[in-house]
Image: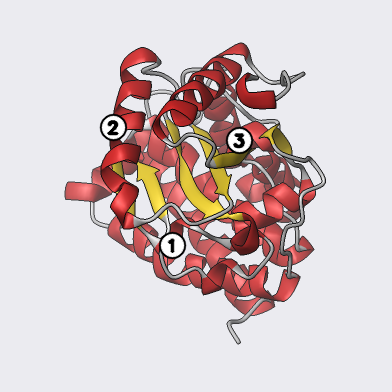
Amino acid sequence: MPGGGATLPGVHETVGEVARRYLDLADEALPGRVEGLYLVGSVALDDYRPGQSDVDFLAVTAEPVTEGDLGTVAALHETLAEGVPSPAFEGAYVTWAQLAADPGDVETALSHHDGEVTVDAAAANPVHWQTIAQCPVAVRGPSDVTVWADEGALRTWVRTNLDEYWAVWVARQRKLMGRGTMLLGDWAVMWGVLGIPRLHYTLATGKVTSKTGAGEYALETFGDEWVPIVTEALRLRRGEGEQAEDYRRRPLTRRRDALGFMDHVLADAATRFPAA
């Protein structure tokens, strides 16, 4: 990799391409400042799917990349997207000191998401910190980086995310109009049916897992009645296999089962892992 980074064995070539190009541009736009680059999300969790997955990152600096750098960072990511339009390269800029401390204490962080660079403290979260602690993918910087990890704080963050994001998301799907029609499509079924047990897994184990890992965990955890819808979500995630007869030409049946499963996992999490 440019700037002293190494190649990434076992990582898809498209990930390596966008990471190399990013470092080239970062070294021009922010010379000497990006000292570490860590990949999180599906790449780190061995679940990267070309054409489906983004590449999530944490760029690490000695001194903060501040709001005064926003224009420079925005131009950097715009140029990157023009040269390598896919996969999307999304993440946040933090310091070594912040990486070694509770991400909840990060008051401001520059974040690139959906093509925009903003100041967003929420971009620093315990799941990313835990991912680096658990399975670091260091493009630049040490693989044995000092990173904060606290299972209690991780579980608290996940519990809040289930309540404030996922429970609200599921509630919006109940009416078969507006956003409620999302669950008639493949993406929302995969996103919800695998996304919620992914956080349930973290509450149960104190570790993080991928969408595929969450589906496998769900098959082992939540009973035979949910096997068809979880298997369907895994089929969509993997992009392989034939759709089960029960769901072929029956999008309303699949939608009903997806809602039922998500409600079940949310209720189980609330019972087994109540908010403090």
Q: Amino acid at mark 2?
A: Ala
Residue corresponding to mark 3: 42
Instruction: For mark 2, give the secondary structure.
Output: helix
Q: Which of label 1 and label 3 is nearer to you?
A: 1
Q: Separation of disc 1 and disc 3 at Cα?
A: 19 Å
The residue furthest left is 178
Q: Separation of disc 2 and disc 3 at Cα?
A: 26 Å
How many marks can you see? 3
| Labelled disc at residue 75 | 2
Q: Separation of disc 1 and disc 2 at Cα?
A: 22 Å
Instruction: For mark 1, give the secondary structure.
Output: helix
The answer to whether residue 105 is left or right of residue 273 is: left
Q: Residue at x 56, y 44 (%)?
A: 58
Residue 250 percent coordinates (x, y): 38, 31
Bin the neighbour count of mark 2 within 10 Å (Cα to Cα): few under 14, some 14-19, many 20 and up. some
The answer to whether residue 267 is left or right of residue 109 is: right
Residue 56 percent coordinates (x, y): 52, 38
Residue corresponding to mark 1: 122
Mark 1 and mark 3 lie on one chain; the one further toward the N terminus is 3
Q: Do labels 1 and 3 touch, CB within 8 Å?
A: no
Q: Do labels 1 and 2 touch, CB within 8 Å?
A: no
Mark 1 and mark 2 lie on one chain; the one further toward the N terminus is 2
Camera sees residue 247: no
Residue 147 percent coordinates (x, y): 73, 58
Q: Residue at x 38, y 43 (%)?
A: 112
Q: Amino acid at mark 1?
A: Ala
In the rendered view, how is the structure colored?
A: secondary structure
Q: Which of label 1 and label 2 is nearer to you?
A: 2
Q: Quadrant of residue 12?
A: top right
